[in-house]
Amino acid sequence: MYAIGEALLGKEPELAHVDLIIGDKNGNVGLAFANALSQLTKGHTPLLAVIRPNLPCKPFTIIVPKVTIQNLKQASKIFGAAQYAVAKAVADAVEENIIPKDKIDEWVIIASVFVHPQASDDRKIYSYNYSAVKLAIKRALSEYPSWDKILYDKDRAKHPILGFRVPRLWRFPYLQIALDIPNKNQVIKIIQELPKSDRIILEIGTPLLKHYGTQLIGELRKIVKDSFIIADLKTLDVGKVEVDLAFEETADAVVASGLASIQTLDKFIYEAQRVGIYSFVDLMDVDAPLEKLKKLKQLPDLVIIHRAIDTEETEKPKWDLIKEVKELGVKYVAVAGGIRPQTTIDALKSGADIIIVGRYITQSKDVERSTREFLKIFEQKQFWSDIDLFRVHEE
């Protein structure tokens, strides 16, 4: 048995990032420990952690540099401040009973240590690595993180080096803005006028996609890096091909028409799942929607109950269909077609997870005000408030 720990502390360029494994010297960790000492790699020479020359810490700990060492100046940082920091942290962990004293001759530790080539402050190199190693050991021996911690943070977190947050649909309801106007410059203007909210997701509408092609998704992604983007392909044929076209341009979800053949929908849903994006099926004008869904090999992630623009004056919303669709096993349902603030509450109470709004917002003289009319409804107690209003992602 062995335990794994990780910790990142400090600021660049002295920032410390430590990954470590701790376990029995007679097991897999011990074998890896022996291999590291006996199979040296140029630029990543492993070394024992020592408090001073001739005084290693216990459990015996080997340091593996993450960054290729190319000169003596870099080597001095690893063989100096970092080496001492690791050894001192391990020794202190034993003294503080983080590591059981009766295990110091049975366990070994392998610590992978990052020292930036431009790091120059030895005191910071020591402090950051000392704290990171100690924290990594604590985490390893406490089996950190718990699954609840991972589940809580996985869709909230923003990786510092990645520079943007990868959006997922995880806390409903959402307001989906249907960008149907076939004018790229006008659409960009609308996007820039939208209020900042975790509740807003963007739909690249069918007319817009027909005018500019799926390449527009990639163009708009540069403007809204953190946004959830749906490609409203209204796929009727070649389901796999159309999913791949949108996926290559970084779409987070794709929409097929429920009028497509069962074979096309099956391929569409399968391919969306394969590449890891959401599959939506729009039930607009489908005569027997429940029967159509029952015939699919696999249900889509979301179904859209949609009134066509041309029938909004004569056709009433089918809110009762929301419950029936969910009873089949579809997780989420969106509603679209002439949605107004006054009809939104009824839709939400009927079980709608996403409210799709187009012209009421995109053709408004005040895009922000029109959008906030819907967001205020979402803020009502029964529909939750904005996500992570006091968001702080620090350990």
Image (cartoon, rainbow, N blue to C red):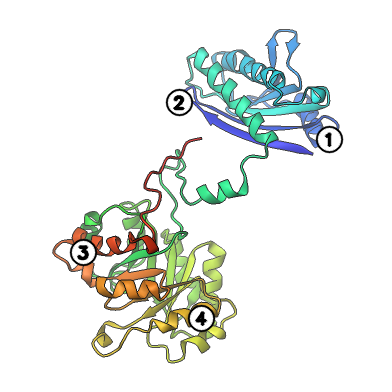
* Residue drawn at point x = 34 percent, y = 75 percent: 346
**Mark 3 neighbour density, 10 Å: few (under 14) some (14–19) many (20 or more):** some
Mark 2 and mark 4 lie on one chain; the one further toward the N terminus is 2
Mark 1 and mark 4 lie on one chain; the one further toward the N terminus is 1
What is the quadrant of residue 199 in the picture?
A: bottom left
Which residue is the site of mark 1?
A: 27
**What's the amino acid at mark 2?**
Lys
Q: Nearer the viewer, mark 3 or mark 1?
A: 3
Q: Circles 3 and 1: CB distance less than 8 Å?
A: no
**What's the amino acid at mark 3?**
Ser
**What's the amino acid at mark 1?**
Gly
Q: Residue furthest front?
A: 381
Which residue is the site of mark 2?
A: 11
Does dot 4 land on a helix, a strand or a loop?
helix
**Mark 1 neighbour density, 10 Å: few (under 14) some (14–19) many (20 or more):** some
Mark 2 and mark 1 lie on one chain; the one further toward the N terminus is 2
Which residue is the site of mark 3?
A: 370
What is the quadrant of residue 315 in the picture?
A: bottom left
Q: Residue furthest right?
A: 26
